[in-house]
Amino acid sequence: MLYGKWRPRGFDEVVGQEHIVTTLRNALATGQVAHAYLFSGPRGTGKTTTARIVARALNCIDLHQGEPCNRCGPCQAILKGAALDLIEMDAASNRGIDDIRELREKIAFAPSDLQRKVYLLDEVHMLTDGAFNALLKTLEEPPPHAFFILATTELHKVPATIISRCQRYDFHRVPNSAMVERLRFISEQEGFSVPGEGLLAIAIQARGGMRDAITLLEQVVARYRAAPSTEDVLAALGMVHDDRSEALALALVQEDLASALALARQVAEDGVDIARFTRETIDILRDTLLQVLGADRPESPRHDAAARVAPAAREHGINPARLAAGISELARADFRLDPTNPVPLEIACATMVLGTGVLAASAPVPAAPAAAGAARPAGRSRQPGQAPEGTDAAPSQEEGFMRELYERCRTVNTVLGAWLNGSCEVLSIGEEELELGFYHPLHMQKVDKDCRTLVEQQAELMLGRAMRLKVRQVERGSPASRRVPKGGHLVEAARALGATPVTKDGD
Ligand SMILES: [Zn+2]
């Protein structure tokens, strides 16, 4: 087990937690040690490892500037897991009041083989309320020979009374650069030869957890021997590059929506994991953005793909801010409901190419700055309570109907409902027909083809009669889209929503 072998034995080997180990080492060197510590942070970031180093440092008979010697009797006993006075408890399986009572009864006895008793309570947030209360009493007046280190991955579940009795240290996710450095060191010591790109891919996959990173390195080497190529590493991590993610990135920076949608559809039909494919596209676009901004990352696994996309982005005059906004659109795409459905990816691509205003405009558009104002007529910009010209009905009624229709459709089907988000408005509500005006043909076609039944069903539920959907393309804010019948349909629609329409005098 590579992880066990390379588990840090001293504070100086703990990776990415300098803010913690420096403080602890100084406290131990000067003898100003607290009786209770609380270590919080994500899994695999070094909490237990650091706790065991503290336990050794508290008992080491040859301490060097706060670092345990790891050679003396007490250090050796702890390293071998043979010390009776280092008591490690997993609160997940010893969570009751009886477990803590037992701990309290034994704590008064003097240590048997070490100088100091150290209690390490892992996953302490799992304790029951009764157990927390019992523990609190112990933390309030610990015997001089007893020390506590509580560890948790979920600090918010630990009562404030417990937290306030402890010296608290928050462990961070380990930065990729620090993980790569450590992985490189371990590889050298073990005689592995892994390319830098491969080590970075491992670090990225481990998401800040050093333990996971070392375990992944071990898996890669177990499968591809001591000198894997970058491709081997990516394959072992399940990060095999699908060339179409590069093609999609290219289509997006060239604002070629038709190609982008065709690629998304094709990938889904091939049964590719769309979430992973999307992440891959995001990675390429992120590197593209950096290259456009002049910040190259040659060590990135997606560097080469981005190097092919970046010139196209520059040639197309891509705006870095828009590219960044587009990347976050893609990152928002949610595939959890249906991992095989490409629609969230399609919507994200559409939003990226057509501009975020298209799908996010269900709220009144604020007065736009000069640059964006030209592309977006200010017709829909409206202060609350200020009726636009030429309408009888309160302006919020049609918007209210549309918003409710969208909310209902989205509740029934998150994926399809998203096509209605800010993409259209109600043109008319007839006896049997609901007419929606769309700002872009893409949304119109999608709703017409894929969402018809959904929209008709929900409109029927809202209005209490069968409705047929009619779609038409309109320009946002144009007089056509503002063509509101006097009284009539909208008033009716408003009544269906429970509103009391206000009639205007002299009209
Ligand atoms: Zn020692």
Image: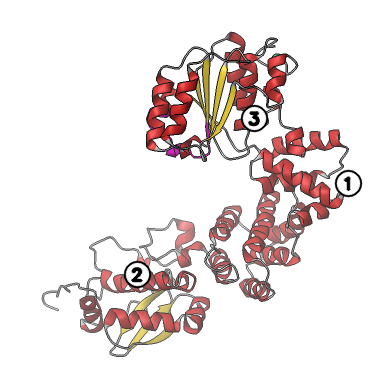
In the image shown, does 359 or 19 lie closer to the viewer?
A: 19
Ligand number 1: quarter of image: top right
Q: Which color scheme is applied?
A: secondary structure
- Cα distance in 3D space between marks 2 and 3: 53 Å
In the image shown, does 261 or 291 lie closer to the viewer?
A: 261
| Residue 49 circle label | 3
Question: Does 158 appear in magenta?
Answer: yes
Q: Position of residue 64 (x, y in %)?
A: 70, 11
Q: Which amino acid, mark 2?
A: Arg
For label 2, the residue is 403
Q: Position of residue 140 (x, y in %)?
A: 40, 19
Q: Which amino acid, mark 3?
A: Thr
**Is 76 positioned to the left or the right of 362 in the image?**
right
Q: Which amino acid, mark 1?
A: Ala
For label 1, the residue is 227
**Is 276 positioned to the left or the right of 490 in the image?**
right
Secondary structure under badge 3?
A: helix
Q: Quadrant of residue 52?
A: top right
- Tell me which numbered mark, 1 or 2, is placed earlier along the sequence: 1
User: Looking at the image, is 476 positioned above or below residue 12?
Assistant: below
Q: Find out whether the residues at labels 2 and 3 contact each other: C-beta distance under 8 Å.
A: no
